[in-house]
Image (cartoon, rainbow, N blue to C red):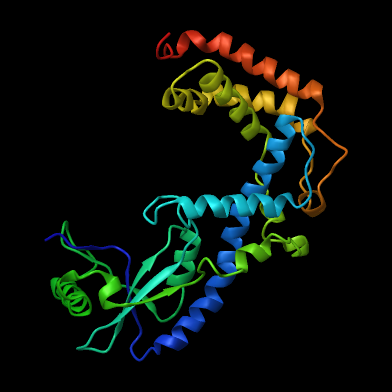
Amino acid sequence: MSTKIHNGYRLAEGTNVFAFIRRVRAALDPVRDRVDGALLARLFTNAVDSCWLRGETVPPRLAFTAFNKWEDEQKKLADTARMKDPNRFEMCLGEDPETGRILVRLYTERTAMRDAFEAMGEVEPYSYWNNYDAPAALTEDQWEERRSAWERVMPDYAPPAETMLTFVLRTDANPGTLMLCSMDGGAEDPVLGRIPDRAESIVRTRYLHQLVTVNGIDVIPAFRHVGSERIGTMLAGLAAMIVDPHLWEITRELLLEGDPARTADPGALVSLQAACESLYEAEKATLPVPAGA
């Protein structure tokens, strides 16, 4: 049977599991705040810029509205969905009954969180697989030792839920991410300090809308077209000329209090639409014929 434990670690001899978990939380909570801040920055930016594109004002408490909408969407996803809990940090910990050493399986998609975990002094990589060659740095005896240790912790490689204890850094009930929505971190705020570049994203979105929704181009060829270097350069030029000078600055006040008096410059929206239409007309000979055309 193929065995693949690519997320395996071993803790230093004599490590107390509960004391270790407390150290993990102290080390990883600030990292989780940073990756959550980047996620919220994208959510809030998209919400503000959607108002801008629709010619609408920014309503009060838009930050919380955007976050609540994202949470509702998360609840609808299957646990196995790729976008489910994108910033999760979860460990399964099991004791080797022969040596007393603690083995860990780590589940996270974020490099920053994995790096912070691996930087902890009591953690060493301890993965094992048998579907291809062992690492050159390990001897056959060392590799066999790992196989035996994992077999003892997970007999017959039973699932971790049946053989190990689980620690989750933040469950759905944890208020940490919600608290970031208040954006009261000052100059070092995890959210406001991570607002992404916006103008090019807006132009790409509007041009994709022109391709797929208006003209019926299939989604995959449309994304490939927009992602090409040549088209990307054109869109960057449109973003700098038409969109960037008119975008609203995203501030704590805008996201929490809204702005009932301001909408996007209608002239900028008309120019953006005309530019997307013109670019499509210039490029349509290079695009696949829409289905059913």
Q: Quadrant of the N terminus?
A: bottom left
Q: In the rendered view, would you say 6 is above or below 205?
A: below
Q: Is residue 60 left or right of residue 233?
A: right
* Image coordinates for residue 246, horizontal then vertical, percent: 79, 31
Q: In the rendered view, would you say 106 is above or below 219?
A: below
| Residue drawn at point x = 20 percent, y = 70 percent | 158
Q: Nearer the viewer, residue 255 or 189?
A: 255
* Image coordinates for residue 284, horizontal then vertical, percent: 51, 10
| Residue drawn at point x = 52 percent, y = 49 percent | 73
| Residue drawn at point x = 67 percent, y = 16 percent | 275
Q: Is residue 139 visible?
A: no
Q: How many marks?
A: 0
Q: Is residue 267 left or right of residue 22?
A: right
* Image coordinates for residue 77, horizontal then vertical, percent: 44, 51
Q: In the rendered view, would you say 7 is above or below 10?
A: above
* Image coordinates for residue 120, horizontal then vertical, percent: 46, 77
| Res 94 → quadrant | bottom left
Q: Is residue 98 left or right of residue 33?
A: left
Q: Residue furthest right?
A: 261
Q: Residue furthest left?
A: 1
| Residue drawn at point x = 57 percent, y = 59 percent | 35
| Res 12 → quadrant | bottom left
Q: Is residue 277 visible?
A: yes
Q: In the rendered view, would you say 115 is above or below 252?
A: below
Q: Nearer the viewer, residue 247 or 130?
A: 247
